[in-house]
Image: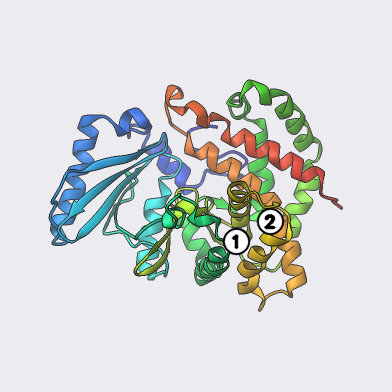
Amino acid sequence: MGRTSCAGSSGSCSAAGRAAESLSATPTGSSAWTDPAWRDEILAWASAALEAAGHRLVGAVEQPHVRPWSTVFRMPTDSGTFWRKAAGFGPRHEAVLLELFAAWRTSHVLWPLAVDAARGWMLLPDGGPRLRDLAPDGRGDHDLESWIRLLPVYAGLQRSVEDRAEDLVAAGVPDERPERLEGILDGLVGADTIWAGLDADEIEQAAVAREVLRRRRDDIAALAADLASSGIRPSIEHGDLHGDNILVGPDGVRFYDWGDATVAHPFGTLTTTLSSIAHHTGVERDGAELARLRDAYTEAWTDVLPRSALVEVASLATDLGHIGKSSAWARAIDGVEPAAIGEYGGGAGGWLIDFADRLGRRVTR
């Protein structure tokens, strides 16, 4: 993928891509995140923002999370814990997205105390424990009843900003609405670097998947057109909604870590959510137990379509959501030094292999 991640776009690159290009001198990647001079710079910025808001540091700053695409610092203050986050080129739009959420008073997200959108820096309040941490063994997200309660809340968030899709795209949130999926997939399939990141034991699968995706391009375009005409309006799509990215604190549920977010068909969320729950619980991915969760989530759109139609649209969006997952992985490592990518290089290709497999089970017109 190129630095601007404009694969498959018609015309000019997205605002997010242009921003990444103009910020090519800004550090990204794990070596940057651990550089003492850079750490001092972001700490000074966050400390000044805390002081301006009347908060005072009372302990040592910790850096518990370092990934090629982002890093997070824990800052203890006299009024509670705050978190400062830095995002790399690909997920840098998270900062401006959170800024918009705060301006719109969007519910069930963490409103930042301070944002430097150009550098992808965010200072956030603590939102409580993660869903996954609610059980002592770290299996809090294995409780399907919790998901039954949480998914309608998230669906409500999506519906609350569906009138803002154009505003989000204009601000730099990646545009992955259904009518753009064909072009995005073309870029992904044609990017040799994506396939080169896979492990050796996946090379044969990858070659088959790549051929399938090229051969069935017209079928995929027809599916994307069906999704675009489904009657469900595009909105914000978290892109990585699993038990580690949901906070369940005293002030209620908060959905966080929006670095993979796009403007897309909202039901694409289910690609990650259902896959993650199936992986962690061992329940059947397409079985009745997760169908209950799907139905609890899509209930928010019963004023738009009957339940039977929602089931079909959810199935279609979940399959096509693999394109968005691959695109998110490609963005995540965009601009990261090759030596720092490590085990994460196969993410984009892996989701395309899965998509080709899902496509093989689907009858197309």
Q: Position of residue 142 (x, y in %)?
A: 55, 55
Residue kind at label 2, given as amino acid type: Ala
Name the image colouring: rainbow
Q: Residue at x 60, y 30 (%)?
A: 194
Q: Is residue 207 left or right of residue 1?
A: right
Mark 1 element type = helix
Mark 2 element type = helix
Q: Badge 2 is on which residue? A: 317
Q: Is residue 284 above or below residue 110?
A: above
Q: Badge 1 is on which residue? A: 266
Q: Is residue 177 left or right of residue 259?
A: right
Q: Is residue 137 above or below residue 312?
A: above
Q: Residue at x 54, y 29 (%)?
A: 345
Q: For residue 5, say whether it is visible.
A: no
Q: Position of residue 338 (x, y in %)?
A: 46, 23
Q: Nearer the viewer, residue 348 or 188?
A: 348
- The residue carrying pointer 2 sits among few (fewer than 14), some (14 to 19) or many (20 or more) residues within 10 Å by Cα, namely many
Q: In terms of sequence position, does the residue under pointer 2 or pointer 1 come before the other?
A: 1
- The quadrant of the image that shows the N terminus is top right
Q: Position of residue 179 (x, y in %)?
A: 67, 54
What separation in Å lies between label 2 and label 1 (alpha carbons)? 8 Å
Cβ–Cβ under 8 Å for marks 2 and 1: yes
Q: For residue 249, say whether it is visible.
A: yes
- The quarter of the displayed image where residue 298 is located: bottom right
Q: Residue at x 41, y 69 (%)?
A: 106
Q: Nearer the viewer, residue 88 or 81?
A: 81
Residue kind at label 1, given as amino acid type: Pro
